[in-house]
Image: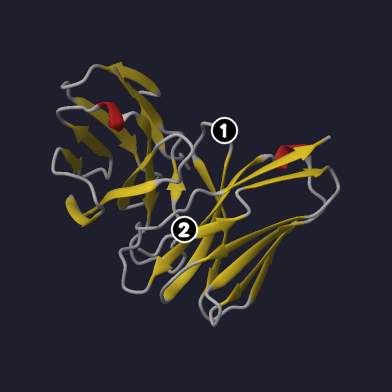
Amino acid sequence: ETGVTQSPTHLIKTRGQQVTLRCSSQSGHNTVSWYQQALGQGPQFIFQYYREEENGRGNFPPRFSGLQFPNYSSELNVNALELDDSALYLCASSLQGSRAGELFFGEGSRLTVL
Amino acid sequence: SQQGEEDPQALSIQEGENATMNCSYKTSINNLQWYRQNSGRGLVHLILIRSNEREKHSGRLRVTLDTSKKSSSLLITASRAADTASYFCAPHDRGSTLGRLYFGRGTQLTVWP
């Protein structure tokens, strides 16, 4: 059973650029959630994807968008990067319909915006 | 929002001692989860307690839940240096989507050898 994997692990962008982060869900999981964690803060929910559609969104602007593919892998896209977008971006997978409810997190992608 | 708020923000103890962290939340929950995060790494799920449960154990971990006070506690017994990490509680709202958890700033636990 493979865990949640994210890529890239680290990246540096400049203000105004666009970035795509990738996530492969844990085997058998059909739901993926994305979180943003600024330094010294807890993770903040960005959105969740289930059956390739957005299924819940936190307080993030439309320039944060995502995709989920038929194999349940996912992408997070951020356009027009701002300095405050610098953070650790975490992907978490889960199984919709499961009574457990726990999330399985990847190690994250650390984004620095200069 | 239904953010979990952990207390204390930081806790420093010696190996072998017990560590207790508390969590408060605001509205009705389906369950409450505790996670651990080593510095700069992903979160690891520790334990989930449902709203109709009062206490749950997993190895050296003991979690309690008091829905009347909207609070939970995490006890780590006989702590080890490897327990050094940030600990987060995450209430899961009734009716909320499965993957939507509300994390607070966490408790930074340091265990000295």
Residue shown at 59% from the left, 37% from the top: B38
What's under tag 1, amino acid-wise?
Ser
Closest to the observer, B69 or B75 = B69
Say left or right for A16 vs A91: left
- Residue to which mark 1 is pinned: B39
Write down the quadrant of residue B14 in the picture: top right
Q: How many residues crowd around disc 2 within 10 Å: few (fewer than 14), some, or many (20 or more)?
A: many
Q: Nearer the viewer, mark 1 or mark 2?
A: 1
Tag 2 secondary structure: loop
Q: Is residue B111 left or right of residue A91?
A: right
- Chain letter of mark 2 equals A
Which residue is more in the foreground, A13 or B9? B9
Query: Which amino acid is tagged 2?
Result: Glu
Residue at figure coordinates x 46%, y 40% from the top left: A3
Q: Residues within 10 Å of mark 1 (few under 14, many from 20)?
A: few
- Figure quadrant of the C terminus of chain A: top left
Is residue A28 in view? Answer: no
Across and down, in percent, residue B72 comes to 59, 68
Q: How is the image coloured?
A: secondary structure
Q: Is residue B112 left or right of residue B107?
A: right
Q: Is residue B50 shown above or below A108?
A: below
Where residue B98 appears, as percent x and y from the top left, is: 35, 62
- To the question of a shared chain for discs 1 and 2, the answer is no
For residue A102, the mark is 2
Q: From mark 1 to mark 2, how far is it between C-alphas?
A: 21 Å
Q: Which residue is located at x 33 percent, y 62 percent?
A: A96
Element marked by disc 1: loop
Which percent across, then down, holds residue A52? 18, 50
Front residue of A4 and A33: A33
Q: Which mark is residue B78?
A: none
Pinpoint the chain carrying mark 1: B
Left or right for B19, reference A102:
right
